[in-house]
Amino acid sequence: VKQDRVVRVALLGFGTIGSSVYRLIQKEHDQILEGTGVDLRVAKVLEIDMSKVPTDAEPSVFITDFSEVLSDPTIEIVVELIGGTTTSFDFVDAAMRNGKDVVTANKQLLASRGQALFSLARDEQRHLRFEASVAGAVPIIKVMRESMVAAELHTVYGIVNGTTNYILSRMYNEEGDYPEILAKAQELGYAEADPTADVGGADAAAKMAILASIAFHSRVTLTDVAFSGIQGITLEDVRYAKGLGFVPKLIGAARLLDGKVSVRVFPALLPADHPLASINGSNNAIFLQGDAIGEIMLMGPGAGGVPTATAVVSDIVSIVSTNEVGFLQSCSCYRQLELYPSEDVESAFFIRVSVADRAGVLALIASAFGEHEVSIASMIQKGRGDEAELVLITHPTKERQFFAAVEKAKSLECCQSEPMTLRVL
Ligand code: HSE
């Protein structure tokens, strides 16, 4: 039987997500009350920049001193939306020690200092919920922790960065080369003024560390994730890939290999009929594979204030609706698995390289790959005067062997450019 219950929350931070959560709680208050019995009230908002305070806000709600949240026993849930990994850590830590449950959207905090915070949540018997930290509105954390509990997940492939997916989608549609599409993305507000974390793969790496920790029940931190970004990809590369039936995507790949964990982020080529190849624009998607489920994919808006705010509000309501603390309150990791060495992972590759266009060159390149047991699956060549452009796709091979073959090819006198290499999923 549903009983109405007042729940007072504090929001830390009133930026894009914080202000969206504030507005969404105002807008959805009555429906949430009707549907769940939770009478949600924003009791305090911690924001040091007073220029952000809305004119219609009750002045006593907006505060600049966090101790006012800690000392208010009527506040049950603290929602951390300030970002970073130092002040946010101290606030989350103090909130749980003071008997408050926590909701956070902070992927960097969880990916780098999650272990300490989840241990504290367990010791203090508090909730630490983080649906909004990965893929915005897409309810991937809940699905993985609850619905996939018996799925025996072994692979999580994610498109978990909207900025890079927007850029690569537009490059695939041949709307421009990387620098101009990035500039357009910044103009439209998809990409930050400093887009390094997005285009360089660090943002996706933090999200994949979180997803891998849940999928494999073994803590993966940001430093365990090897990542590279999309900065080196040119329109020419994309055109060749498209001609061969592939779509470029920034992919997060978390896999269980021989009982060890491999988590990486890299630009990859996907066959055009792969479910992730159809994810366009700034959308995110997570593709799960497990022994017991086959394949499941979730997709949707991975960023933006309002979509992300829906994940925050759902975490708040889940906390209130969970009797005691429940298994979802804290860490899903009950074991610590070893990391799988990156160079032992097997991958197929795309290679594009300029070579001298004369007799015997193809044989030289082919033998460099053959010597390292890298088998070539397909090849195209385009003549350009004295030079030719070679594009090869390999069969899957240990990455150690592939990169040794590339080094060998580079050292050949006929090789006239730095080879461009991309993994093929
Ligand atoms: N900057 C991220 C993206 C959204 O482009 O997907 C926030 O995690």
Image: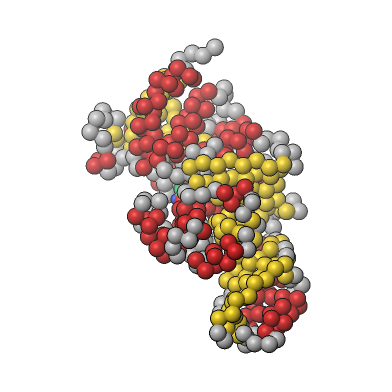
Nearer to us in this view, 56 or 160: 160
Give above or below for 96 relative to 418. Answer: above
Give above or below for 425 relative to 12. Answer: below
Whether residue 266 is visible to the viewer of this picture, yes or no, is: no
Q: Quadrant of the N terminus?
A: top right
Q: Is residue 150 left or right of residue 228?
A: right
Residue at coordinates 60% horizontally, 69% vertically from top-left?
421
Q: Is residue 230 left or right of residue 215?
A: left
Q: Give the quadrant of residue 371.
A: bottom right
Q: Give the quadrant of residue 211.
A: top right
Give above or below for 186 relative to 217. Answer: below
Residue at coordinates 65% horizontally, 40% vertically from top-left?
296
Q: How many marks?
A: 0
Q: Is residue 12 left or right of residue 322?
A: left
Residue at coordinates 59% horizontally, 32% vertically from top-left?
328
Task: State how the image is colored.
Answer: secondary structure
Residue at coordinates 23% horizontally, 33% vertically from top-left?
55
Query: Percent position (x, y) of residue 186?
Result: 37, 56
Query: Percent position (x, y) of residue 223?
Result: 56, 57
Query: Percent position (x, y) of residue 103?
Result: 47, 35
Query: Percent position (x, y) of residue 8?
Result: 40, 25
Nearer to us in this view, 383 or 289: 383
Q: Residue furthest top?
A: 1
